[in-house]
Amino acid sequence: MTARLAPPAFRRLPGGVASVLALACALAATGCAGPKDAYPAVAEAQQRQAAEEGASARAGSQIDTQATYLKLVEQMQQEGLWFASLAHIDALEQRWGASPESTRARAEALRHAGQAAQSETAYRRLLGTPLAAAGYRGLGLLAGARGDYAEAVRMLRQARDRNPTDALLLNDLGYASLRAGQVAEARLPLMQALQLRPDNPQAQANLAMYLEATQQHAQAAALMDANKMPPATRAAIRDAARQLARPAAPPVVAATPVAGAPVLDDSAIPLLLKPSQTTLRPRAGSNPRGAP
């Protein structure tokens, strides 16, 4: 709930402990950037280019069925190659035609590429298919990214009704409920998310935020102690809980973040409804990140 649905989103409600740390690292890197820091950036760009070229080579040599191509596209997206995946989705659909699976992959890629309107169109095409849950979830994430948390809750509930055991979706729904001012309604999905995925940092942080927001400070402290949250993360959670008590700001229309502003993606800080990375299936044996 990976629209990038302002601060801890600890998905998709457009992420967490990990996101807080990521933001701190990003700020530190920005403040200390110098000539030496350009080399890691160049190396990272070269690695990403190599990854894209490798993915394209695999696609060119291993495509024999639609299912095989879809798996390659999913792998690209799990590696963050959203723009490259769009090109391969075009090629896939030219060869085999559009399917609910390729439409979901396209919607995800467009959302992560910042193409909100086109992404929404693709998600809506899923609503009458077996992948309707992914469609509603994506629409919820988009609504959260523009600050419309009431709509995000409505869409994420539709997704939850169709996929009630998805812990990351439940986490998004709980967070969106908090941001929409529906604090009492947030408790159930947040508790479900944590019990289904007790090792998930976002579920831990969002439940701690709920406990702080409802004046259950001892329980919140116990939860943070049990999960060994660092002081900076605890402070961010408490600040996020205090923000929940303030009057809600009007929905944000602009989708393009300004420098230093939180965005709904996988490095978002708490209070930005963060998606659980993607509505795609996680890779076998991987630890899904999260929330965009």
Image (tube, helix red, strand yellow):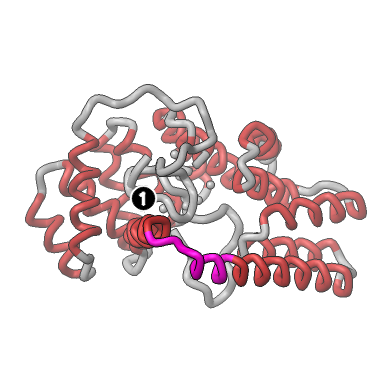
195 or 211, nearer to the observer: 211
Q: Secondary structure at mark 1?
A: loop
Return the residue found at the far bottom: 285
**Is 70 left or right of 150, judged from the image as shown?**
right
Residue shown at the point (34%, 63%) measured from the top left: 201
Q: Nearer the viewer, residue 48 or 115?
A: 48
* Above or below, comparing residue 86 to residue 204 in the picture: above
Is 213 part of what is drawn in magenta? Answer: no
| Region in magenta | 32-41
> Residue 164 location in percent, x, y?
45, 51
Tell me where residue 187 sits by quadrant.
top left
Instruction: Characterize the magenta stretch by its predominant secondary structure.
Output: helix
Relative side of 210 to 122, left or right:
left
Horizontal side, residue 85 vs residue 188: left or right: right
Residue extending furthest right? 95
Q: Quadrant of the N terminus?
A: top left
Q: Is residue 81 visible?
A: yes
Residue under label 1? 269
The residue lying at 41 percent from left, 41 percent from top is: 261
Position in image of residue 79 (x %, y %): 62, 65
Q: Is residue 36 left or right of residue 238?
A: right
Q: Which residue extends farthest front?
A: 35
Rendering coords of residue 112 (x, y %): 60, 48
Q: Splitting the image into 4 quarters, where does residue 84 fall?
A: bottom right
* Rendered location of residue 212, percent (x, y): 16, 47
